[in-house]
Amino acid sequence: MSAAGTRSVPRCPVCGSSGRPLLNLSAQPIYQHPVPEGTAVPPPHAVDLSWAACVKCAHGWQIEIDGGLLETIYRSHYYTPAPGGMAVTFRNEFMATMERFGLLGPRRRLLEIGASDGDVLAELQQRTNALEAYAFEPNEENAAIAVRRGLTVQPRFFGRDAAAYVEEPVDFICARHVIEHVLEFDDFFQGLNAVTAENADLVLETPSLDEHARRCSIAPFHIEHIHVFSQRSLATLALRHGWKMQRSEVTSDGNLIAVFAKNDVLQSGAETIGARMPEFSDLQAAVTSRHDRLRALFADRYIVFWGAGSAGVSMVSTIGREPDMWTDGNPNKVGKVFVGLQSKIASPEIVFQEANRRIADKPILLITSSFLSEILPRVRQLGWNGKVMDLDGNPVIDPRPQHG
Ligand SMILES: [Zn+2]
């Protein structure tokens, strides 16, 4: 990248130690979410990305980032809000974890950073009977929906000036899938420390580097994730800013959810953290072999993608071609296109009708989404006559209705 905003990050942004190469991915899509057709976005539309892993705290980070470009992506190209009841798997898992951690007792004030359309925060408020629920959400489309849910919404990024927008300190604060995007940790934690009461619980959710490395999954490695946290690096970062990890767990989708309490003394971190150092050395080799295998598997095949988000654009880059048709269960995405690609998102009904006419071509339905369990019932209901595969090219189910 040659943009003026580009900077390199040679040392671990969490603990300052040196890094080893973790993963290189070439020609990755810059824009992860579909936009209305005709939207003009100047090139480049793809970029080579590299992550390093810290030798001390096992943090994964991008070694070259363009902050101005990322801010543009977050403001204008963030994901399309889904109608109620869709894409709820992550939310339900999060709520179940909050319950297991004993965090859903009575609260006075809640705050969510990066609240999207406010669905999680509204449910937290309802379950904790909190008087006030503050949401920070820079994407205007999402912020507008959150306002309609009765939340107190700040349509801005969260940082050290946050206290100006919060009347009294909050006793619960959460940030789901935010910390991996944060450019300035000091700014972020200064805001956190300014808006929280002494007894506050902090909850962070972020893709787990330990878990994705174990599965050899590249799902968390895209342009928007300037960090990929190990349990060790997340605990280290928080401790350096006055928060001590109390408990954590990894969800079935590989997300790390951790709860923190305020710690009186700032600690330097890594040396006090018990978590073991994970092993990342196989990741690059596994990614290369998956890439070669998927390219061979999908060459010259009639393919339909279900899932118009980061997993889909990443798959286009992996297999070096667009699908023959692209669909998504979210009707708000129908008719949209990805920046730099040709495909237009069509409704599942239209796509299935067309694919079922192409039965002689043995069409493959590739589920390019994390919400497999929500999508499969619809696939079955709509009647798919070909193979169904997951992101690794493995068959998932026989979606044809069983008779007798
Ligand atoms: Zn480190």
Image (spheres, rainbow, N blue to C red):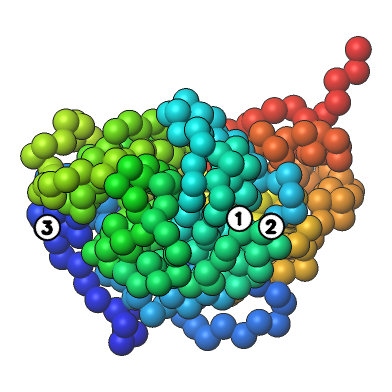
Identify the element where label 3 is drawn: loop
Q: Residue beneath label 2, please? A: 149
Q: Are marks 2 and 3 in contact (CB under 8 Å)?
A: no
Coordinates of residue 46 in the picture (x, y in percent): 46, 72
Nearer to us: label 1 or label 3: 1
Q: In the image, residue 178 lies at what x, y percent?
A: 42, 56
Secondary structure at badge 2 equals: loop
The Cα–Cα distance between marks 2 and 3, rounded to whole angstroms, is 42 Å
Q: Residue at x 17, y 45 (%)?
A: 264
**Residue that badge 3 annotates:** 16
Please state the horizontal and vertical placement of residue 255, each as a whole percent of the image: 43, 40
**Residue drawn 16% across and 36% down?**
273
Q: Is mark 3 within 8 Å of ligand 1?
A: yes
The answer for how far apart the CA atoms under marks 1 and 3 are is 35 Å
Kind of residue indicated by mark 1: Gly
The front one of 285 and 368 is: 368
Identify which residue is drawn at 20% across, 67% down. Answer: 9
Q: Is residue 151 above or below residue 228?
A: below
Going from the N terminus, do you reach mark 2 or mark 1 first?
Answer: 1
Of the image marks 1 and 3, the number of the one nearer the N terminus: 3
- The quadrant of the image that shows the C terminus is top right
**Of marks 2 and 3, the one in the foreground:** 2
User: Label 2 is placed on what type of residue?
Assistant: Arg
Asked if the residue under mark 1 is in contact with the one under mark 2, i.e. CB atoms within 8 Å, the reply is yes
Residue 380 lies in quadrant: top right
Mark 1: secondary structure: loop
| Residue 377: percent from left, percent from top | 77, 34
**Residue 118, which numbered label?**
1
- Name which residue type carries label 3: Gly
Say if 286 sits above or below 53 in the image. Answer: above
